[in-house]
Amino acid sequence: MKKVIPIGIDNFKEIITEGYYYVDKTLLIKELLDLTGKVNLFTRPRRFGKTLNLSMLQAFFENTGDEEENQKRRELFKHLQIMNAGDAYTSHMGQYPVIFLTLKSAKQRTFQSALFKIKECISQEYRRHAFVCDGLKLSDSEKQLFQKLADGKGTMDEYSGSLQFLSQCLYKETGEKVIILLDEYDVPLENAYFRGFYDEMIDFIRSLFESGLKTNDALKLSVITGCLRISKESIFTGLNHLKIISVLDRQYSEHFGFTEQEVKEMTEYYGHTGRYDDLKQWYDGYVFGNTCIYNPWSVINFMFDLNADEQAFPRPYWVNTSSNQIIHDMISRADTMTRNQIEELLNGKTMDIPVHEEITYDDLEDIGDNLWNFLYFTGYLTKESEYFKNHTVYLKVRIPNIEVKTVYTNTILNWFQESVKKKDFRELYRAMEEKNTGKMGEILTEQLFSVISFYDSAENFYHGFLAGILSQSEKYLVKSNRESGLGRSDLIVKTPSLRGRAFLLEVKVSDSMKHLEQDAKKAVQQIWDKNYMEELKLEGYEQIDAFGISFYRKDCEVQYGGTYE
């Protein structure tokens, strides 16, 4: 019986003990010990294995105070790569108190609610270490404060210093310095930015980190994960022992996400080697350091679906795990230059950006380099190459794969549908009724210049574009036949009353400007050759007008094809 795919399970102990499939990332431990960074910040996109890796570090390093439990944790690593690294590394197993705090659930609507959630996580970690109060090394006042924080009754200032205080209590009781693991530290900041209480959250997170990481003599090692390096706001002020490892760094590059070899091994294990090309096209494309990386969340979800159905279609698993608010905001605020840049990326091209690693959520207000950097570090763009020019590192970036491309295209279409609802297209309908093809072309071209286009799926784009505009009329009904696969005209526009009028519109996409007129005429001829008006005749419409419309990028040609009466 094959091992089960661990969908949504980010607890290392559970994955190993319950027999789930595990992609071995334990050599992360060796690299951490070799490089000896005091405070290590790993920035990676969401759903790239950060929480699972921290859970693995906790299972390896933590002394639970119970020798039987410690032995069980050692057994978790019995067949994993770290056990072959030597005593210099395995001697650290079960030796340290560990504080593990995840901030990924702090996504509430108000600052007070989000702060309550963070306090609750801190209190839970205090309760997990309640054994220190049973010892003799803490003073009565220390025990009282400890219990106060465990009960969720501490003040703002007391919680601000809670990481440092818990570290000191653990060090005092055990005699060993503490390892602090902080998961998704920037989730509260992202949430606060979009909710409108960014400054308040920044102040609290800064105080929490300063006490726990900067002025903490009880600290052995810290590993922090997030999407961005938020340093402009001085969250990490004065941390001269901070090591930042981003997607640009070659160190640790293979430990977050799946390598090509790991994906191939998984497809072979489950017998899905025939679907490897789909996996590569949809979920590969990331480059961390110099290592090619697959999106692990999407790979395991697709593998799970393949185990149930070998013919399963790939889907955008990763992009459906978040709101993709940043993409929507970018598109809605885009100026002409930004729209052109997005179009270039959607059509498979690259763009050059100077690297700004110290971006903040406040920088999202800028349409420019900061925005593109944000998209890069959060996984919506990837690096094709890099170069050094004028004392600055530059990246050639592109959209990583089909999956990520879907979030751009779907968001663009949704934004377009929202935007056209605010516009008055009565003039377009009047031009149709008057058979004024010149006016029709002028209006459609004007709209094309205001929308972001993606030409590699051109027919679907232009069809959706035209249907979206025509659907805004209260006088006419619009029926799209493209999705039905029937031998009918692309679009039928008709009045609810049979005494009214009906229009047939056939869409063509030209390969150059010089073919625009010719292709529009071909569209007209197709309407008559295939007798597309038959459906409307049978319904009872007595006046049916035909139009052929051809598109090439931002230009279009409209040809009148006659009236059936």
Image (tube, rainbow, N blue to C red):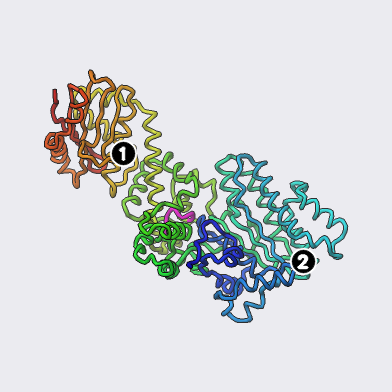
- Residue farthest to the top, as pictured: 499
Task: Characterize the local packing of mark 2: few (<14), some (14-19) or many (20 or more) Cα atoms within 10 angstroms.
Answer: many
**Helix, strand or loop at mark 1:** helix
Residue 270, label in figure: none
The percent position of residue 200, horizontal first and vertical second, equals: 65, 43
Quarter of image, res 84: bottom right
Residue 126 horizontal/vertical position (percent): 74, 56
Mostly what secondary structure, the magenta segment?
A: loop
Label 2, label 1: how many angstroms apart (C-alpha)?
A: 63 Å
Q: Residue at x 59, y 77 (%)?
A: 83
Looking at the image, the residue that sits furthest to the front is 1
Q: Nearer the viewer, residue 374 or 563?
A: 563
Residue under pointer 1: 464
Closer to us: 456 or 485: 485
Q: Could you say which disc has been placed on residue 171 in the image? A: 2
**Nearer mark to the viewer, of 2 and 1:** 1
